[in-house]
Image: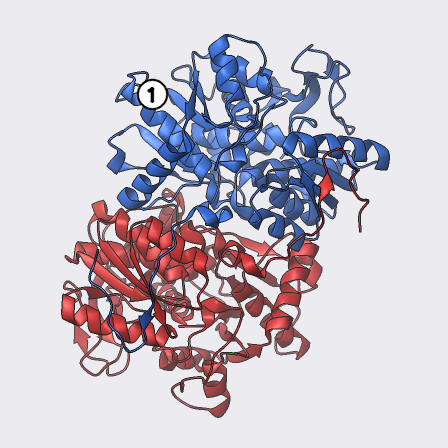
Chain colours: A red, B blue
Amino acid sequence: MRSALSHLQCSDCGREHDADRLQNLCECGGPLLARYDLEGVTVTPDEIARRPRGIWRWAELLPVRDDARRLTLGEGETPLLNLPSLGLPGLVVKDEGLNPTGSFKARGAAVGAARAAELGATHVALPTNGNAGAAWAAYGRRHGLDVTVAVPGAAPSVTRGEAAAAGADVQVVDGLIGDAGRLVGRAAAARGWFDVSTLKEPYRVEGKKTMGLEIAEQLGWRAPEVVVYPTGGGVGLIGIAKAFAELRELGWLTGPTTRFVAAQSSGCAPVVDAFERGADDVEPFPNPETIAYGITVAGPLGGRQVLRALRAGGGTAVAVDDEDALATRDECARGDGLLLSPEGAVAVHAARVLADRGWVAGDERIVVMGTGSPLVQPELLPVPTGLIARDGELRGHG
Amino acid sequence: MRSALSHLQCSDCGREHDADRLQNLCECGGPLLARYDLEGVTVTPDEIARRPRGIWRWAELLPVRDDARRLTLGEGETPLLNLPSLGLPGLVVKDEGLNPTGSFKARGAAVGAARAAELGATHVALPTNGNAGAAWAAYGRRHGLDVTVAVPGAAPSVTRGEAAAAGADVQVVDGLIGDAGRLVGRAAAARGWFDVSTLKEPYRVEGKKTMGLEIAEQLGWRAPEVVVYPTGGGVGLIGIAKAFAELRELGWLTGPTTRFVAAQSSGCAPVVDAFERGADDVEPFPNPETIAYGITVAGPLGGRQVLRALRAGGGTAVAVDDEDALATRDECARGDGLLLSPEGAVAVHAARVLADRGWVAGDERIVVMGTGSPLVQPELLPVPTGLIARDGELRGHG
């Protein structure tokens, strides 16, 4: 299996860059994206379907060149699950909580760490609200990299423990993820670490692209009408859109132009605000606060790209209150046995809002991204009370 | 796809029972096991390999008859992961933490709840150290069942929250899982609930059997020399052994007779004690205490079956101290990026002990079951300390 990676291209100014050395941003400050020689790709979807499971089935469309770097912890191949009790027959949730380390971040780290190691990095650093840190710690160690993680003091503590257990240097910052990102940038420059912050290197998004590759295959190579994405940094959304674009160029994907939906929490909705204002880029959201900590990103670097992806296909952006998200989470768990993370619940609730508005029709296919495991924030789970003596008697139901 | 289920058979007295009505134990008190008309199975391994992923690929070898009951939350299809830094090239971990609800218990609940619903149960009840309760709550709700869970007060709290979020009635018992099991038995009898305690109904073990079916397929239909199983109730071990036996009868599985290893914590090692004494059944372990809460089962009902499975293939039983298990957990996470649950760490450490003793040879294939997610017990993860000001500076690497 041979990667078709040809070069990097700035998503803002369009300038091309060498793909085979470590790169961060373009000189213009824009994020770099991987480009492939798609005309030279000769593998077929059937061949890919017969390969051993996992994201490396898509090797031609991923940037890693050395087969020995295609290491796995079992990431990818997540299911599309229906939620019959919601009454939206076209809706399925892609349950990314079943990934190693508990979130879709495993995909970005699997590819990002492999490519960083392949290109000679020895120490990577990133800011994180938690899931990305846990993922990079694990995949970093899988590739023998040292990992430094800077995490906001208010972020969930479980993922810090995951990262620290894998030997990452976890440093807690008295601020938000933007503050942590600035500290990472300065330290990386001073110490020679490779800065793998969201979109500051080109390959995390390639890993997240595998969500889109899998969705296309799972839906029989017909694009869904709608993809709803719980949007913090928004790299997953950019990645899925990139997957669909590449698959269409290959001639593998047909069907409608997908409308992408950025679902955000009302307490941190910079993309929704910018979308509604008709702006080209986001402005930092003041005093962000939501239980959906994974999408608490006040000023996402990829805001411009996300807005472009939303508008390109006629998509939209929806803000959801925490209490509505939790109510939907409980409804899905009690009705269908699927316990979503708060971020996933924000996205499912956004889909319900759009259905209520008539923005999606009953027979349209809606893929909602459930980005992580509910186990990362156990403090949001209910706590049963009461204690029954060992020689006592159980209560009847409710 | 048609289940080949033919009848149930008592694993103690051998008496046969009707499979198509709800059944608990045999009159003699022995657990019932599902038996299949394997001669009538015409599907081939190749056909199974081409079916959509998930445990229901194995429908012929599972007890559920109604296709509409073959519901999924994405369980099964877990990877075999190597741990190069351990220096045991034949060792792989089957990472069951990637299942829905965070453990292999999802498999047992997926099949058990489907079959209970298919046979007319409306309310199921079980004692649990946590993972089984979370799994049965989810799959119970997937099938529209009411679920009552009785959990020891000292069990990890995260899984209680999972179960409660899915609408299960979670009742905390001031005692151990044996005490919770007695309360469930009494309440089930009094209230007409179906008691789905470990081995008290025949189908959880069939779900867990899918671990063995997958291992056989993943290893190219050649049985591994050794399977190491972190043993509490021991149903997973019984299930894997049952899978291998059925696959050999079908003629699909070749290779060596697998030696099964029961790995237990020194703080709760009734199977190890019985094995070393040469006893036919376990005796309750006094004052059990270990961080590996999932295998804190002082008097497993299936002890007799586990001991039989160990001895049948020339297997053994190993007790591991908590501190050794944690040291091995940290080594695997730091060396290879795989963060094990404490139960998985007990099993990997047991494999290392057996390698040190020369009980396994360097070229033998050892499959170690990593039964759950480390996120279920976040209190066992390290806690990073210190707080860096938002205008401060990150530390260099330790």
Please determine whether, in this image, residue B316 is positioned above or below residue A230.
Answer: above
Query: SS at mark 1?
Result: helix
Chain at numbered mark 1: B
Q: Is residue A24 visible?
A: no
Quadrant of the drawing holding the C terminus of chain B: bottom left
Residue A107 location in percent, x, y?
37, 56
Residue B342 location in percent, x, y?
44, 38
> Can you tell which quarter of the image residue B192 is in?
top right
Q: Nearer the viewer, residue B78 or A11?
A: B78
Q: Is residue A263 left or right of residue A248?
A: right
> Can you tell which quarter of the image residue A209 is in?
bottom left
Identified at 55% across, 26% down, the residue is B234
Q: Nearer the viewer, residue A42 or B272?
A: B272
Instruction: Estimate how packed mark 1 is, as few (under 14), some (14 to 19) or many (20 or more) residues with alpha carbons within 10 Å.
Output: some
For disc 1, the marked residue is B354
Residue at the top extreme of this rendering: B278
Identified at 38% across, 65% down, the residue is A243
Identified at 71% across, 20% down, the residue is B7
Please determine whether, in this image, residue B347 is positioned above or below residue A237.
Answer: above
Residue A105 location in percent, x, y?
39, 59
Quadrant of the drawing holding the N terminus of chain B: top right
Residue A202 location in percent, x, y?
26, 67
Identified at 26% across, 30% down, the residue is B89
Please determine whether, in this image, residue B92 is positioned above or below residue B153.
Answer: above
> Can you tell which quarter of the image residue A216 is in?
bottom left
